[in-house]
Every structure is written in C-alpha cells, then in structure tokens.
Image: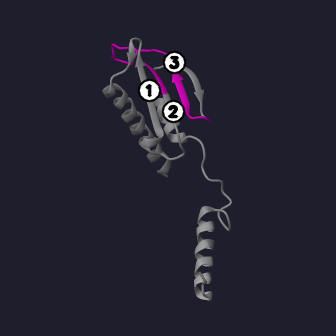
Amino acid sequence: MQMNRTSRATLGIALALALSACGIIGGSSAPAPVGPNPILYAAALDTLNFLPVTRADPAAGVITTGFATPPGGRTSYAATIQITGPVLDARTLRVSLRTPSGPATFDAQRGVEDAILARARQIRIAQTQP
C-alpha cells in the first residue's frame, strides 16, 4: 500500500504526539510514579494502629500484623495489607483479615477496607489544603 505525502506527514505527527505523551521523546523529565501509593500505605498504618506490626515494607507496599483486639471489640484480628500500585484507588488495596480460628467475615474485611480508604481520603484532603 502506498501512502501519499500528506498521509505520511499525518502519521508522523500522530506518532510523535503519541511518543511524547508516553514520555519517550520530548516528555517530562520527572519519573513516572512507581511502587505503592504512599497515602494508602500511611492510611493503612493509621487505621490498623492497634495491631502490632510484624512486617512493614513501604517499597513493596506490604504490611503484616500480629493478632490484637480492636478497641471496644471482642474478636482478635491479624491483617495483611498490600497496596499494589501508585494510584490512590480502591482497586490497588488488598486486605486479608483473619481471626485465630480462620478468615474474618466479608463484612469485617470490607469494614477495614472502607476505614483505610476513608483515612486515605482525609490525608489527601489535608495535603491539598493550603
């Protein structure tokens, strides 16, 4: 298939724009964010501050805790939290909650996820205010 000069020029411009948008040519010198979202990580630590942390790896986005009972609660819990990406988004948050007798209920796990996300929202809002 033969392309005329106009088609080739249009294709060249489109390719250059796409590459610059990706940062390959003429893009920003700032590196793209990698690793876990620091706001979600901090929110998880704040939310689960009653649990003894046994492993915290901010580079990998993993927090593992030992068992403890939440204030006003009756059941002891342990948690493993993983933040899988740089975006402040619920899809990057993985919560595994367990009791001494096995996995925690779905509602308990969802409650912890919601609490972490609410705390992350508070942190984000506090950072954007002058």
**Vertical placement of 37 versus 71: above or below?**
below
Residue 121 in picture, x, y percent from top left:
42, 43
Q: How many marks?
A: 3
Residue type of the residue flagged with mark 1:
Ser
Residue located at (44% from left, 30% from top): 95
In this rendering, the label closer to the viewer, 3 or 1:
1
* Residue type at the position of mark 3: Pro
- Residue at the spot 44% in from the left edge and 26% down from the top edge: 96
Q: Which residue is mark 3?
A: 52
Label 1 near label 2: C-beta < 8 Å? yes
- Between residues 52 and 109, which one lies in front from this camera angle? 109
**Mark in front: 3 vs 2:** 2
Looking at the rendered structure, the secondary structure element under dot 1 is strand
Dots 3, 1 in contact, CB < 8 A: no
Whether residue 1 appears in magenta in the rendering, the answer is no
Disc assigned to residue 82:
2
How far apart marks 2 and 1 lie (CA) works out to 9 Å
Residue 126 image point, x, y percent: 46, 45
